[in-house]
């Protein structure tokens, strides 16, 4: 099989799987419970997914990444400004990279 055809088939199948999951979610949404443990689980799911995506990067960044993370969280809680909090984190990472290059 030609490599370009393999890539096209893989993309097509991934698109079918993605949209099937989306449509399935829309069709099943009315049947999910509005209260109880399952509802609490579903409400917490986006946060846990975000943590699972961000945590490996924080750990890989080492101590500076952890310092940046703590400062981002504290800045976000204190200022209620997500953009400013991200800016603080980027500055910490930039300074750490500049210091490691010396």
Image: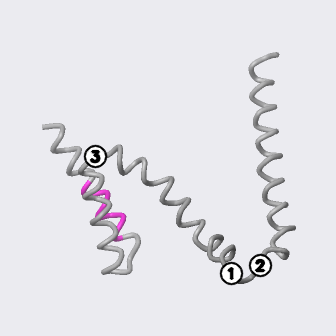
Quarter of the image containing the N terminus? top right
Instruction: Name the secondary structure under disc 3.
Output: helix
Q: Which residue is mark 2?
A: 33
Q: CA distance from mark 3 to mark 1?
A: 39 Å
Toward the right, the furthest residue is: 27
Q: Position of residue 41 (x, y in %)?
A: 63, 71
Q: Which residue sits at x=29%, y=73%?
A: 74
The 10 Å Cα crowd at callout 3, few under 14, some 14 to 19, many 20 or more, is: few
Q: Which residue is mark 3?
A: 62
Do the CB atoms of the residues marked 1 and 2 lie less than 8 Å apart?
yes
Q: Position of residue 14 (x, y in %)?
A: 76, 42
Do the CB atoms of the residues marked 2 and 3 lie less than 8 Å apart?
no
Which region of the structure is painted magenta?
Answer: 84-92
Q: CA distance from mark 2 to mark 3?
A: 41 Å
Q: Nearer the viewer, mark 2 or mark 3?
A: 2
Quadrant of the rendered image containing residue 78: bottom left
């Amino acid at each position: 099989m030609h490599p370009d055809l393999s890539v096209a088939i893989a993309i097509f199948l991934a698109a079918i799987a993605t949209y099937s999951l989306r449509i399935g979610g829309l069709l099943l949404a009315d049947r999910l419970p509005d209260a109880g443990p399952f509802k609490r689980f579903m409400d917490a799911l986006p946060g846990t997914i975000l943590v699972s995506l961000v945590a490996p990067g924080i750990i890989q960044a080492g101590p500076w990444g952890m310092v940046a993370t703590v400062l981002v969280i504290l800045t976000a809680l204190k200022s209620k400004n997500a953009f400013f909090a991200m800016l603080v984190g980027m500055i910490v990472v930039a300074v750490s990279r500049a210091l490691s290059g010396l």
